[in-house]
């Protein structure tokens, strides 16, 4: 089933304002919320609230919209047992509508808070062990874990939801998708790559799922898409540069860039052309529908739309009115024609 979600940018908005937008997202017809879990924002002028407190508030203030982390790094800043407990609590507050998204993190959030930033292969190994421990704790059994990176002694979660919690793994490049297929219930990635990249990513994802005895066709494939629903292109670009320029620099995700100021300095190299190429900026709903449809045609079944401005509430209302219904209608038409 096609799911259309909203990206909640903790890096841009203070938590109370972001909570109001979450309520608006539900009211305007979005199916889900994907919220960042960061210790630092991408820019000195940004925000960075504690996402687990915010998720508790969002769960209490909404009734049907799904929500989850996009994504949490459960290997350095948190012990996996704490992530397991936090996720279980939110899942109790939002029954059948919480998911846990995990990834290997960025130095901006992990090195800054812990002084640790091992190479990628070690971080991935740590995440594999973290996922194993999280899933074990979710069973409700007492867990004594003596791993390479983590230990527990008779640890048990006494507060758990009645339904299983979906766990999704982030993959930014095709090479990591096999790990996601093997260890997760679904894939999370970002838009902006060439179709061939996603084809390779899906092939690796399917291989990993098959190795784990899972049917990849039943596993969600999620993508975060950068969009701004406005005719003020200049203002939209200004907001992207002001809060998000750092994310357009690949080194941010691989190197030891650990302060918002460092991210901000790197982001100064990002020009308007780079942003226009990566972000769908238009006031025409047909442009946005075609943009999103390309990813649906590639095989993604869960889209998160991330708007940076200039007016977040106007975006939610406009997309909920003009774009989401059309995408659902097109999906239904396609499903009927295939059937």
Image (cartoon, rainbow, N blue to C red):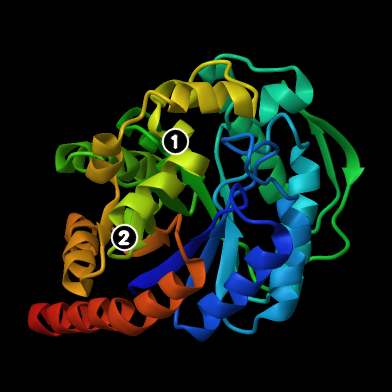
Residue visible at 80% across and 59% down? 140
Q: Residue 106: image x %, image y %?
A: 57, 29
Residue visible at 59% across and 60% down? 68
Residue visible at 64% across and 73% down? 20
Q: 238 or 206: which is nearer to us?
A: 238
Res. 288 mark: none
Q: Is residue 163 above or below residue 204?
A: below
Is 334 left, or right, of 77 in this rendering? left
Is 252 left, or right, of 177 in this rendering? right
Q: CA distance from mark 1 to mark 2?
A: 18 Å
Q: Residue 147: image x %, image y %?
A: 74, 26
Q: Residue 278: image x %, image y %?
A: 28, 43
Instruction: Classify mark 2: helix, strand or loop.
Output: loop
Q: Which residue is mark 1?
A: 245
The extreme left residue here reads: 337
Residue 106 appears in the rendering: yes
User: Of tags 1 and 2, which is closer to the observer?
Assistant: 2
Image quarter in which the N terminus is found: bottom left
The extreme right residue here reads: 154
Residue 138 appears in the rendering: no
Query: Which callout, 1 or 2, points at the residue further toward the start of the chain?
Result: 2
Q: Residue 276: image x %, image y %?
A: 25, 44
Residue visible at 49% across and 25% down? 252
Is 53 left, or right, of 263 in this rendering? right
Res. 232 mark: 2
């Amino acid at each position: 089933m096609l799911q259309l979600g909203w990206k909640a940018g903790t890096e841009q908005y203070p938590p109370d304002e972001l909570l109001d937008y979450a309520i608006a997202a539900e009211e305007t017809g979005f199916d889900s919320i994907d919220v960042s879990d960061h210790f630092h924002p991408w820019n000195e002028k940004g925000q960075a609230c504690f996402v687990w407190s915010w998720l508790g508030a969002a769960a209490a203030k909404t009734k049907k919209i799904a929500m989850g982390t996009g994504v949490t790094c459960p290997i350095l800043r948190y012990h996996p047992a704490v992530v397991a407990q936090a996720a279980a609590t939110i899942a109790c507050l939002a029954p059948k509508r919480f998911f846990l998204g995990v990834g290997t993190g960025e130095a901006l959030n992990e090195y800054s808070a812990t002084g640790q930033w091992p190479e990628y292969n070690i971080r991935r190994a740590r995440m594999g062990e973290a996922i194993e421990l999280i899933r074990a704790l979710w069973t409700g059994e007492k867990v004594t874990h003596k791993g390479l990176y983590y230990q527990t002694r008779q640890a048990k979660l006494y507060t758990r939801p009645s339904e299983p919690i979906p766990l999704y793994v982030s993959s930014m490049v095709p090479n990591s998708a096999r790990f996601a297929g093997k260890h997760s219930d679904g894939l999370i990635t970002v838009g902006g790559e060439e179709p061939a990249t996603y084809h390779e990513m899906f092939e690796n994802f399917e291989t990993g799922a098959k190795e784990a005895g899972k049917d990849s066709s039943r596993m969600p494939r999620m993508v975060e898409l950068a969009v701004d629903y406005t005719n003020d292109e200049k203002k939209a670009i200004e907001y992207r540069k002001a809060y998000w320029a750092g994310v357009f620099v690949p080194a941010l995700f691989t190197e030891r860039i650990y302060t918002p100021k460092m991210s901000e300095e790197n982001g100064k190299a990002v020009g308007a052309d780079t942003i226009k190429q990566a972000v769908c900026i238009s006031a025409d709903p047909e442009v946005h529908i075609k943009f999103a449809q390309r990813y649906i045609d590639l095989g993604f079944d869960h889209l998160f739309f991330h708007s940076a401005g200039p007016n977040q509430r106007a975006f939610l209302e406009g997309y909920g009115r003009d774009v989401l219904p059309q995408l659902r209608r097109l999906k239904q038409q396609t499903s009927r024609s295939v059937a």
